[in-house]
Image (spheres, rainbow, N blue to C red):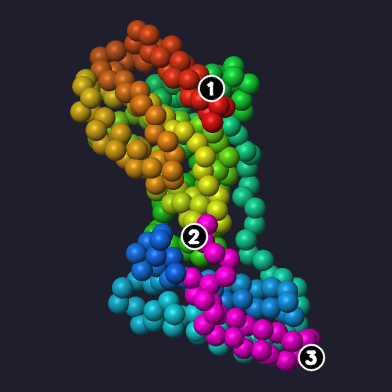
Amino acid sequence: MMSESGTEEKTQTIETPEGTFTIRLTMDDMGSVYPGMIRYNIEVLRGTETVYTYAINSYEIPPGSLFDARKAAEIVFARLAEDVSSRPHLYLRPRVFTRPLPGDTVDVVILQGSPRRFGNSAKIASWCDDEAARAGLSSRVFYLQDMDIRACIGCYVCYDQGYCPVDDDMPRIIRALETASLIVVCTPVYTNTVPAPLKAAMDRCQWLHAREKVLGKEVRARGLLIAVAGRRGKEAFTCVTGVVKAFMGNLGIGFAEPILIGDLDRLRDVAEVEGIEEEIRGSLRGLLVSGDEG
């Protein structure tokens, strides 16, 4: 988690009919997160109470821009000083722009990545959901195709205060992932990788990485990939395995031995693969037990 206070760069005290205000600009070195990342924080205090905050980091500013992050922060600092001087009544109460994430906390999160609601990945997700229930644990299957999940725009705003500016269904997934002890990804292979809705959700979990670094919201979970493919052979899963492993590794999620099921163009129904349901259920049971012990 980043430190709560950085290096103080600039301070201005403003006397108004509503009392004394202080505007403070601080700098955080976030090079441990990304090379050269600097975050500038502006805080408006009425007495000792923080009534307004603003932050911007150096990765938000595209290369070749007229202003760098420091200059942008100094402009905001000057405008806030002018606004507090002319309209102090607007800063009498805290103006908080962050809010708790909506959604439920669960023990097991299942990301169902297939666009087919009743396909093989959905069937596997139902087995995982059932196994969690048998273990007396809460679980949630997220049918990503049915959710409003927009692509990550690479703005890096989440590294300012731990919140994403994109307004969609992703907060519910982030909330569940933060509290889960087991995360299961069920996916088919589409063009050697994962389907678009799942990739979008995994990319947006960069927000969760930011929450880990900025707010200390550490993910403490193990992860399991269960993938299906039409073709035979392990090579069909090379990209999928790499993508999901990178997603989990970025969040510090322990990557368990994946279950990879091929030749479904011929077999069609995953339930017809001899012993596969019990293998999946057995893997879930093992991970749930080890999670409880950990």
- Per the image, the residue denoted by label 1 is 289
Q: Main secondary structure of the magenta part?
A: strand
Residue type at the position of mark 1: Val
Magenta stretch encompasses residue 21: yes
Magenta stretch encompasses residue 148: no
Instruction: Give the mark, 3 or 1, whose residue is nearer the N terminus.
Output: 3
**Residue 17 badge:** 3
Q: Distance between the residues labelled 1 and 2?
A: 34 Å
User: Is 163 positioned to the left or the right of 260 in the image?
Assistant: right
Q: Distance between the residues labelled 2 and 3?
A: 36 Å
Mark 2 element type? helix
Mark 3 element type? loop
Q: How far apart are marks 3 and 1 (CA)?
A: 62 Å
User: Is 68 positioned to the left or the right of 89 in the image?
Assistant: left
Density class for disc 2 (Cα within 10 Å; few <14, some 14-19, many ≥20) is many
- Percent position (x, y) of residue 166? 50, 57
Residue type at the position of mark 2: Cys
User: Is 266 positioned to the left or the right of 33 in the image?
Assistant: left
Residue at x 50%, y 36% (from the top left corner): 221
Residue type at the position of mark 3: Pro
Which region of the structure is painted magenta?
1-28
Density class for disc 3 (Cα within 10 Å; few <14, some 14-19, many ≥20) is few
Instruction: Give the mark, 2 or 3, whose residue is nearer the N terminus.
Output: 3
Residue at x 30%, y 77% (from the top left corner): 64
- Per the image, the residue denoted by label 2 is 158
- Marks 2 & 3, CB-CB < 8 Å contact: no
Q: Is residue 172 visible?
A: no
Which is nearer the eye, 71 or 32?
32
- Percent position (x, y) of residue 19? 78, 86
